[in-house]
Amino acid sequence: MGTFSWTHLLIIALLFVLLFGAKRLPDAARGLGRSLRIFKSEVGQMQAESAPSDAPAATPATPAPQQQLSASTTQAQTPIVEPQQGHKTL
């Protein structure tokens, strides 16, 4: 069921020729090849640029100090909203 036989592949190839025409298929394949080549070179450049930055840093990162809030500031920041009459609450 999951395998294509040679007849399935032949039918798919004929559909492509009928849909796109025999003149457009070589141009489409050429364009696909160019775009894959460009994509491959860009990925290679990105990997080359990121390789030196992957080295471990000499100084370990220290976590930021935790901030402590007093009870009065947390209450002032969170307003209390009471439901209005006639409205349902979830």
Image: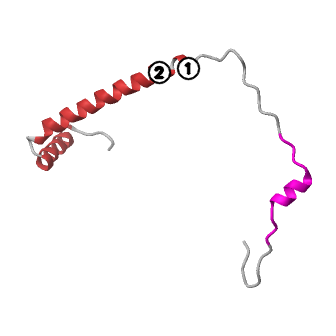
Instruction: Place residue 88 in its image quadrant.
Output: bottom right
Residue appearing at x 14%, y 39% in the figure: 25
Residue holding disc 1: 53
Please give left or right for residue 55 compared with residue 22 in the image: right
Amino acid carrying mark 2 in the image: Glu
Label 2 residue SS:
helix
Nearer-the-camera pick, 64 or 26: 64
Residue appearing at x 12%, y 41% in the figure: 24
Nearer-the-camera pick, 90 or 86: 86
Display colour scheme:
secondary structure
Category of crowding for the residue at label 1, using alpha-carbon neighbours closer than 10 angstroms: few (below 14), some (14–19), many (at least 20): few
Magenta residue check for 24: no
Rendered image: mark on residue 68: none
Residue holding disc 2: 49
- Residue 40 x %, y %: 35, 26
**Total tally of numbered discs in the picture:** 2
Please give left or right for residue 85 compared with residue 40 in the image: right
Q: Gap between marks 2 and 1, in whole Å?
A: 8 Å
- Residue 4 x %, y %: 26, 40
Residue stretch in magenta:
67-81
Disc 2 and disc 1 in contact, CB within 8 angstroms: yes
